[in-house]
Image (cartoon, rainbow, N blue to C red):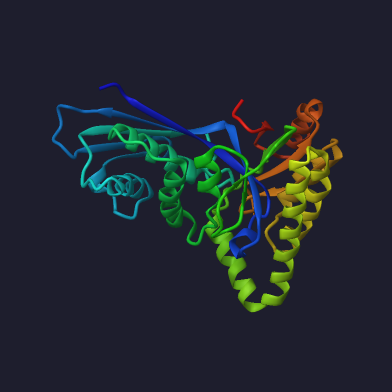
Amino acid sequence: MPAITATAPGKVILFGEHAVVYGRPAIAVPVNQVRARVVISADPHSAPGRVLVRAPDVGLEAELGELPEKHPLAQAILGTLKAFGLERMPACAVRISSTIPVAAGLGSGAAVSVALIRATATFLGQRLPAERVSALAYEVDKLYHGTPSGIDNTVIAYGLPVYFIRGQPIELLKLPVPFTIVIGDTGIQSPTAIAVGDLRRLWQEDPGRYEALFDAVGVIAQAARRSIESGKPDELGPLMNENQVLLAKMGISCPELDRLVAAALSAGALGAKLSGGGRGGNMIALVRSEAAASVAQALERSGAIRTISTSVRLRAQ
């Protein structure tokens, strides 16, 4: 049996992070320049059910049975088995790798889960629709983020730009005109679960203030959708700037992110904001395609450890 390979892209949130946890809309898009990759190879010489999991990027090599049941990689495999009414895998080796930075707002955990679920299903001779893959990955994402919104697993499983409201049917965005964003990585790992938990405590202490901030973010996301679907992506720039101000008021930004946002705007970006959990991780800048290189250089001069330029469109490039 030939080896089975599955991949999944990273993602960025254009608008609505954090507010999406509280029922407001958010917009997210896949980032195909970085991907998680899973390769599953049959091992006919081993006993049935022996699954060797290798993830060299995080120094992991262990049998599936040795991993705690609540380990994210174990849950992705076991959850897929359960979906098909199976109790064990055929003997195999699973190799996991990723070019997606960890704890940087690019959906590294959800991408690994989606790729692992798809590879496992295919190895079992089964096929899962994107909706089911997303649902299984969401269960794994709870281990990473505590109370995730569901947006990471959704945009990564579908591999398309999405307009997302928690608990409502997924809406794929119409995108008549592609646009370019530059992603700048602060190099600061910032687990989303911590930022989400801290913000929840602040919301509990002063719900009126934070509900007003979430409402304002929701209005921006709605306006952004209208601009995207009407083919006017340049209008997203000012909306990004407004969203960044609101995120800063929530306490989600940090000096390093503020510095990169300012550098992007000074270099000619149409708008810029943090993306994801905040307090580190990544920021994004909307640029005209011809300005992408100069904005990326400005970000690197201002401390970004890496940059990614990506064109947002309906299909992978």
Residue 226 or residue 186, whichever sits in front: 226
Judged left or right of residue 114, residue 65 is left
On the image, the x and y values in percent for residue 65 come to 22, 47
Q: Is residue 283 visible to us here?
A: yes
- Residue name at image x 27 percent, y 41 percent: 62
Horizontal side of 74 relative to 13 (left or right) equals: left
Q: Position of residue 57 (x, y in %)?
A: 43, 36
Quadrant of the image occupied by residue 101? top right
In this rendered view, identify the residue nearer to me: 255 or 83.
83
Can see residue 54? Answer: no
Q: Horizontal placement of 162 versus 225: left or right?
A: left
Q: Is residue 195 above or below residue 256?
A: below
- Quadrant in the picture for residue 297: top right
Residue that appears at 57% across and 48% down: 189
Locate the C terminus and report the quarter of the image it occupies: top right
**Coordinates of residue 237 in the picture (x, y in percent):** 81, 44
Q: In the displayed structure, does residue 97 sit left or right of residue 45? A: right
For this rendering, which residue is in front, 303 or 183?
183
Query: Looking at this rendering, what residue extends furthest in the top direction?
Result: 2
Count how many numbered circles sit on residues in the image.
0
Write down the quadrant of residue 215 in the picture.
bottom right
Seen in the picture, residue 268 relative to 259 is either above or below; the reply is: above
Q: Name the one closer to the observer, 105 or 242.
A: 242
Residue displayed at 41% across by 31% down: 6
Which residue lies at the image location 45% right of the left edge and 57% below the top edge?
142
Q: Quadrant of the N terminus?
A: top left
Instruction: Name the spot of residue 278 as percent of width and height, x first.
Output: 64, 53
